Amino acid sequence: MTDAPGGDGTAGRRRAVPASGKTSRVRMSAAQRREQLISIARQIFAERGFDATSIEEVASRAKVSKPVVYEHFGGKEGLYAVVVDREVRSLLDRITTALTAGHPRELLEQAALTLLTYIEEETSGFRVLVRESPLMATTGNFSSVLNDVAHQVEHILGAEFSSRGYDPKLAELYAQALVGMVALTGRWWLEVRKPRKETVAAHLVNLAWNGLSHLEAKPGLITVRKR
């Protein structure tokens, strides 16, 4: 038995391939395109910051025209606001969810380890948050996350201070100090990545907890002479 013209049995297979030899590209939905643009912008904002990022580059990496980006976000400011808002909510949700322990020391451990884990897993997102922009000077940035976390810590410390005979009004001051210490250490660890995050968290808690456990009720500055 002989094959159809061509004699090698490949003619039918050749006819099954489109003449152009190209496959059609699947068109993104509006929601998919928006998510793609947010993801690309997040990476560029992390790399370059707000000022050095351009809509042209976002559009180029997404392989779309600039009007497509403007259609979704109205401009660079709108795109940046969406990216930052997502990161703020993501980090705050992580920390809020992590604070489940009953003992204050365990809460400190959970908060420190959660922030370091976020830095490890969402490095680009953290870089976006710590790059300050004049557009987000007071809200919607890393500072606003830290303030929200500090308020939670303040309530915990306030109750602890009252039970130990310390002035609960000072809980806000200590909460800001503790959260700030963890945050600044996190920014340092973002670049060095050693020692391991668990070790970093343990040392942070060691400094914070052992300091808190030996608080003076009315501390004074030994360098300031009494008059």
Image (spheres, rainbow, N blue to C red):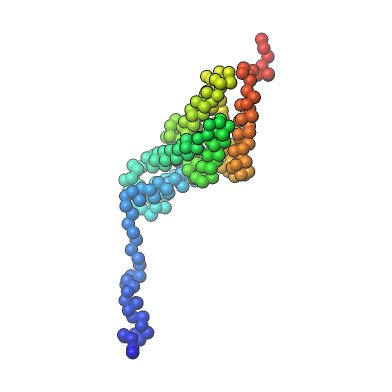
143 is higher (above) or lower (below) than 168? below
**Horizontal side of residue 190 vs 134, given as left or right:** right
State the count of labels: 0
Q: Quadrant of residue 184?
A: top right
Residue extending farthest to the bottom is 1
**Horizontal side of residue 121 vs 41, given as left or right:** right
Q: In this orientation, which residue lies closer to the viewer: 121 or 164?
A: 164
Q: In this orientation, which residue lies closer to the viewer: 77 or 173?
A: 173
Give residue 122's position: percent from left, percent from top.
Answer: 49, 45
**Horizontal side of residue 110 vs 223, given as left or right:** left
Going 58% across and 32% down the picture, which residue do you hit? 105
Residue 80 seen: no
Q: In this orientation, which residue lies closer to the viewer: 225 or 113?
A: 113
Going 43% across and 38% down the picture, which residue do you hit? 89
Q: Quadrant of residue 186?
A: top right
Residue 146 seen: yes
Give residue 41's position: percent from left, percent from top.
Answer: 42, 46
Q: Quadrant of residue 222?
A: top right
Give residue 104's position: percent from left, percent from top.
Answer: 56, 30
